[in-house]
Structure formats: C-alpha cells, structure tokens
Image (spheres, helix red, strand yellow):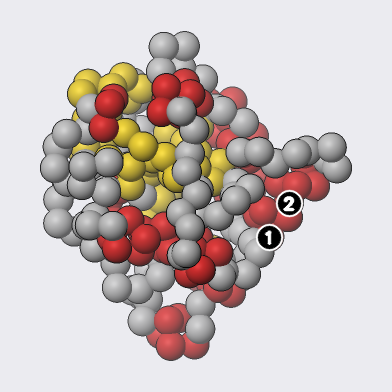
Amino acid sequence: MNITCKCTAVHLEFFTQTALFRHECCCHDCTAALWYAHKRGGPAPPVYQCLDSSWFPNAFTIVKGEEKLGAFLNFKNADSTRFYCTDCWSVVFADHTFYEKKVLVTQVMNYQEFEGLTNVELMPPQARHFVKDLSPDQLAALPLWREDPSHVYQGPADNLLAQFPAMREAGQEGKDMNAQILLEKIGGAFVPVGEPRLSEGPATLMRKMTRQAEGESHDDNA
Ligand SMILES: [Zn+2]
Ligand SMILES: [Zn+2]
C-alpha cells in the first residue's frame, strides 16, 4: 500500500496491501483537521462531515519526503496526532493513543483532487460512527449508507472496538520507521493557535474510553 500527498513530495510505502479495518468516521475532530489543513492551503475535504478511514500496521518506509512531513494536534492534549505534508498540507495519516503503536489510520482517500492511496485492497466499510456529532442538516447531507443499517452508530462503533485487540495483534510497530519514530524526527506535533473550530466538537466517547482504559495516572501528553 502506498500513500502520497497531493504535491507528491511525500511518498510512504507500507508492507501490506490489506487494510485491517475500514469504516466511516463522522466525528467533529476528523473533519475539522482536514478543514484546518485546507485552510492552510491543503486539498479540499468532502463537503459532508464523514471520512472514509482505513487502518494499517504501524510500519512503513518513507520512499521520499521525510523532511517534508509535519505533525499537528487539533488541540492541546488531543489523543490524535495527524501527519501532513508541509508543502501541500495533505493530511496523510494519523496516530491515536488508543492504537498502542501497533496500527495507524489513513483518511487520505477522501481527497478528490488526487489519488492518495494506491496499491491497496480495501474491504467494504464495516461501520459509520459518531453520527451524534452531526446536526440534522449534516446528517441529511451524508452519502447513503449501503451496508448493514445496524452498523451506524451514534458514538464509537461496537464492531470496531470489538475488533481492536485483533487489529493490534495483526498490527506491527515498525522497527525502522513508524508513527512514533517519525514524530520524534519531526520534533513533536504543534498545536494551532486561534483555531477554535478544531476543538469545538463534543468530547468523544472514544476519548473518554481511552482515558478509562489507560487509568487515572495517564498524563495524556500525546
Ligand atoms: Zn505534498
Ligand atoms: Zn473521527
């Protein structure tokens, strides 16, 4: 599987073609991140608030563009770290504390201006989740859900959470390159200032569950 950015300065190559899971995320945070990147000059996100998302093992090779990669958090102490091309502001993949360094998620295929995800075998979407983040108008604007209607979730998808241990098991923490090694090389993620839209979403259940799973002592520096 390969990920490239719009300007092609960044090219990542993964060691598998097969996604570990695929779903559609309607949470505020995912779309707000692409909106912010678009504001900085990046490609346009979908007009509706819902992103096609696929997980892969956290192991890849940077074919080119290591020096072009940057990282940001939507807000201080956010659980998701999003990696992007500093030249063209395509968001290429994201890490989350819940992934325990074993997997990462990409939403680069939501961009219509270029084909960011290639050489890949995607499964049908298994769920559509966090529709609670949508207003009635936003809900009405979504593409039709053609899969099992019981797999549309107000909060986090039950079938995703049930699958996560197996996804981590099938995942990988790349020895030579992974999201954490890359973040170290970048020098950490920055937090945009003066961008209230990035943090105005409702606190996600995923975020709360992550906290519970990690216990009270978790300092949430991710
Ligand atoms: Zn680029
Ligand atoms: Zn999301």
Most extreme residue toward the top is: 175
Could you say which is closer to the camera, residue 175 or residue 199?
A: 199
**Considering the numbered disc 1 on the image, is that residue within a helix, a strand or a loop?**
helix
Give the vertical position of 213 relative to 138 (above or below): above
Give the vertical position of 17 relative to 201 (above or below): above
Q: Residue 86 placed where, x, y %?
A: 27, 41
Residue drawn at 24 percent across, 55 percent down: 42
Q: Residues within 10 Å of mark 1 (few under 14, many from 20)?
A: few
Q: Residue 172 placed where, x, y %?
A: 50, 21
- Marks 1 and 2, Cα distance to the nearest angstrom? 6 Å
Q: Please indicate whether residue 209 sits to the left or right of residue 143 in the image.
A: right
Q: Which residue is mark 2?
A: 209
Q: Residue 25 placed where, x, y %?
A: 47, 60
Residue drawn at 32 percent across, 33 percent down: 69
Tell me, yes or no, whether the two marked residues, 1 and 2, touch with CB atoms within 8 Å: yes
Residue drawn at 75 percent across, 47 percent down: 211
**Considering the numbered disc 2 on the image, is that residue within a helix, a strand or a loop?**
helix
Q: Which residue is mark 1?
A: 205
